[in-house]
């Protein structure tokens, strides 16, 4: 088991190194932040000073090796626009993004699981067909368009919810969160639902197919033959057996929700990492862009690493297959 973990950690480090090269070259080889960040009236001497201060006077390969050297010590660069460490900027906004992503995942499970179960139990009924049609819309509709429609209906027309922002926050273990106040909850509801829409549709389809497959199994038929109540058969024998793959997929989707929260945070002016990266792209703040992308890659790698380790614990054949491979 220890050898398996060491091998997977080394593989993850190699992936992170390759991704750092691709991300750095992709970001630093495009555009010129000097044209965006300093005044057009600045003379050549001032421009040269800024270029040297940002380290842009060095060749690209040398900039990358300096970046790698600093990254090994936990320094991913200093923001061109804010003149503060890029990681500090990202970590300041990370609680807002994690709160929004967690709320979206929670909504996906709370809404998707019962709706998918209902669709699986009544596949040919009006309710089942309506739920499946709605799930197709969840997959198909663009996130930004749904967000704008939510604002138009619930904020502008009905006036029930605020249009943007995070609302009032309160400290929880020193971290500002908005779900502990009524004002914060009202601000959180629409962006969380907008971000959760795709995953609600995904959970509905996974639960429906899993329920239909489980209903055909012998243990369900045996439970019915014993005269067990239908609610017990569904709650214990069906739901319990289909939860494992659903939980696995939802856990893997958590990284995607964090990464793709950019659109939702922009539409609802949610002060998270997504809005920061959009602002950074607008002014070509390269260190922040690189730090954000590498952080997202690291989150994906860590999630996959944890999932692989859990699989190896649950099924030793995974370790054997890895060692033979």
Image (cartoon, helix red, strand yellow):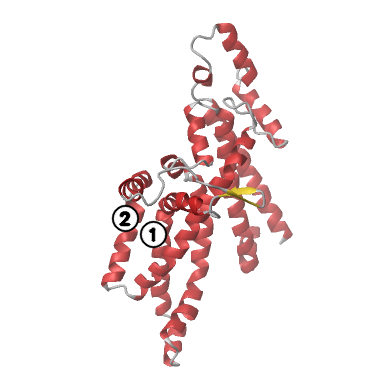
* CB atoms of marks 1 and 2 within 8 Å: yes
Residue 305 pos. (x, y %)? 62, 54
Q: Residue at 49%, 50% (x, y): give it.
A: 183
Q: Quadrant of residue 288 in the image?
A: top right
**In the displayed structure, does residue 196 sit left or right of residue 90?**
left
In the current view of this chain or complex, which residue is farthest to the left? Answer: 126
Residue 107 pos. (x, y %)? 46, 59
Residue 227 pos. (x, y %)? 43, 92
Q: Which mark is residue 201?
A: 1
Q: Is residue 63 above or below residue 182?
A: above
The residue closer to the viewer here, 85 or 22, is 85
Query: Mark 2 = which residue?
Result: 137
Q: Residue at 70%, 31% (x, y): give it.
A: 70
Q: Is residue 255 above or below residue 56?
A: below
Other residues around mark 2 within 10 Å, as few (<14) / some (14–19) / many (≥20) = some
Q: Residue at 68%, 27% (x, y): give it.
A: 66
Q: Quadrant of residue 55 in the image?
A: top right
Query: Does dot 2 land on a helix, a strand or a loop?
Result: helix
The earlier-in-sequence mark between 1 and 2 is 2
Q: Quadrant of the N terminus?
A: bottom right
Does any portion of residue 124 appear in the rendered image?
Answer: yes
Q: Is residue 49 above or below residue 259?
A: above
Does any portion of residue 209 appear in the rendered image?
Answer: no
Q: Quadrant of the C terminus?
A: bottom right
């Amino acid at each position: 088991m220890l050898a398996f973990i060491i091998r997977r950690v080394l593989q993850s480090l190699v992936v992170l190194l390759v991704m750092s090269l691709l991300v750095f070259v992709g970001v630093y080889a495009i555009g010129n932040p000097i044209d965006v960040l300093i005044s057009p009236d600045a003379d050549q001497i001032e421009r040269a000073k800024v270029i040297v201060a940002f380290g842009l006077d060095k060749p690209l390969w040398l900039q990358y090796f300096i970046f790698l050297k600093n990254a090994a010590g936990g320094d991913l660069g200093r923001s061109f626009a804010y003149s503060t460490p890029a990681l500090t900027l990202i970590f300041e906004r990370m609680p807002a993004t994690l709160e929004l992503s967690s709320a979206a995942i929670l909504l996906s499970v709370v809404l998707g699981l019962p709706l998918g179960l209902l669709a699986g139990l009544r596949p040919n009924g009006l309710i089942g067909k309506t739920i499946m049609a709605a799930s197709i819309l969840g997959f198909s509709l663009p996130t930004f368009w749904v967000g704008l429609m939510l604002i138009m209906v619930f904020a502008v027309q009905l006036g029930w919810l605020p249009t943007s922002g995070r609302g009032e926050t309160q400290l929880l273990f020193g971290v500002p969160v908005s779900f502990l106040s009524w004002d914060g909850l009202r601000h959180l509801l629409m962006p969380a639902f907008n971000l959760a829409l795709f995953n609600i549709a995904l959970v509905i389809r996974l639960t429906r197919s899993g329920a239909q497959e489980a209903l055909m199994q012998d243990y369900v038929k045996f439970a019915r033959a014993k005269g067990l109540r239908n609610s017990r058969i569904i709650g214990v024998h069906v739901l319990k057996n289909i939860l494992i793959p659903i939980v696995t997929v939802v856990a893997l989707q958590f990284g995607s929700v964090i990464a793709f929260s950019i659109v939702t945070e922009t539409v609802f002016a949610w002060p998270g990492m997504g809005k920061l990266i959009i602002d950074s792209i607008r002014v070509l703040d390269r260190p922040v862009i690189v730090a954000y992308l590498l952080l997202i890659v690291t989150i994906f790698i860590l999630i996959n690493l944890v999932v692989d380790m859990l699989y190896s614990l649950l099924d030793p054949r995974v370790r054997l297959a890895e060692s033979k491979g």
